[in-house]
Amino acid sequence: MTKGASASALARSVRHGDLSALECVTQALEALATPASGAAVTDRLEDSARQQATQLDTCRERGETLGPLAGVPFAVKENICTLDGRSACGSRSLAGHRSPFEATAVDRLRRAGAIMVAKTCCDEFGMGSSGEHCAWGPTTNPWDPERVPGGSSSGSAIVVARGAVPLALGSDTGGSARQPAAFCGLVGVKPNYGRVSRWGLVAFASSLDTIAPMTRTVSDAALALRVMAGHDPHDESSSSRPVPDFESSLGKGVSGLRVGLIREFRGHDSLHPAIAVAVDRAARDLEAAGAELREISLPVASYGLPIYYLLSSAEASSNLSRYDGVRYGVRSQGGDDLLGMYEKTRGESLGPEVKRRIMLGTYALSAGYYDEYYGRALRARAVLRSQVERQHRELDLLLCPTTPQPAFRLGEKTREPLEMYEGDLFTVLASLTGQPALTIPAPERVGGLPLGVQLIARPFDEMTLFRAARTLEQAGFRSGSLEPESGQNS
């Protein structure tokens, strides 16, 4: 059986001929068709996946060299463009949209032998922290169907947590991969900004958006990132830095690394006691493995949320102006004139959370308020970056919670957007600075719900990030081998 197996183990079995790619894909498609996983999936790509698997098996029989992800089934969030399946971003404005091109990250996974088996649901245009803001309906946590799975990469988190696929792509703008990974008991990586091409990722906030792998093990995350990373001529923001062999760092341990614990996060009023315990356990495990711990202060980090929501909403206002029924998107019928058509189209096709952020961003960019809000947020972001850079002169890693609370109940925060936004309290730091960050599931649980601990590394130092995460994994942090009971519905 392939369910629950790691990507690296599956690829090894396919390359050695112990398992066929078609067997891997067939079992993944069957798992994705169950009610438990079905709500997370918007398109099950049965025909194309079987065809690609058959072709790969034929290549192996001919003795051809197969890639590092040979035969590995993977899923892709709906706001990432693919030639197979729809790329509707969880929005009525793009209902049924099929992309004429494919994201570079997806293309590189395919070239490495991975086989896309599904597109997954997400909060509309990546705007949401719960998985409740998708036009096709809400999703639920695989560990407790009365709880949210996190957002916006909710569907990708669910299918990996269920064991249907070992790898899925999400996107992370302010925590959209790390938060659902923490809520669902997974490893979620936000690469350094520019490490992975954004070509084919539908823009929400262009200075923050990243494509992010979600897996059950640290080694699978390292493998996926190595395959996807690297400069792309389609994306001028992609880095030309050489891509290291991330997997080679996994056995190096943390001896001599200096790890900072952020005082403002450790003592935050909204932090659940069990998550504080999980962070302390991670600190002890790293120290026991040879790392040096220091408590540090990042005063501006307390203002991360307003900085993030002003900047990201302003960029969303600009990026989403194109969905007007003329340039992009479904056009509504009616309206007395051109303006009326625009109003009717955007009013009917965009959801309430997207509208809220567009209005916030438009206000922040408006004449008379631009410098007061958007300009001030830009300056505060620069100060935050400066503070973090200063700390990293003496520190290799920062250790902090991923989320303030475990997964909350469905509907609990939909009427209180500020409470919903607080879920990004600890993830926006790395988004604003552009640094790589990773969440790993902790041994602690609350009512059976997973909890996450977050590591943040120096710019472009994913190698150290994976070293520390692997050390925690070996020290007893869950590797993702546990799965929700099959009877629980998602």
Image: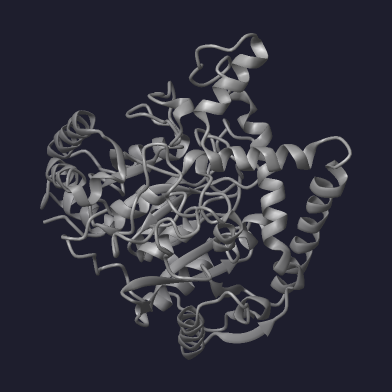
Q: Residue at x 43, y 21 (%)?
A: 100
Q: Residue at x 21, y 38 (%)?
A: 64
Please state which of residues 195 and 125 is positioned toward the viewer in this rendering: 125
Query: Residue 436's quadrant in the figure?
Result: bottom right
Query: Residue 360's quadrant in the figure?
Result: top right
Q: Residue 39 vs residue 92: left or right?
A: left
Taking 465 as reference, is 78 above or below it? above
Taking 296 as reference, is 46 above or below it? above
Q: Residue at x 31, y 74 (%)?
A: 448
Taking 111 as reference, is 249 above or below it? below
Query: Residue 308's quadrant in the figure?
Result: bottom right
Please state which of residues 333 and 224 is positioned toward the viewer in this rendering: 333
Colour scheme of the rendered structure: one colour
Tally of marks: 0
Please state which of residues 252 and 457 is positioned toward the viewer in this rendering: 457
Q: Residue at x 73, y 64 (%)?
A: 303
Please state which of residues 321 and 243 is positioned toward the viewer in this rendering: 321
Q: Residue 246 vs residue 337: left or right?
A: left
Residue 455 drawn at (x, y percent): 53, 70
Q: Is residue 237 something one can see in this rendering? A: no
The quadrant of the image that shows the N terminus is: bottom left
Taking 476 as reference, is 39 above or below it? above
Residue 176 drawn at (x, y percent): 50, 53
Q: Is residue 193 something one can see in this rendering? A: yes
Residue 280 drawn at (x, y percent): 51, 85
Residue at the far top in the pictured view = 337
Residue 279 drawn at (x, y percent): 50, 80
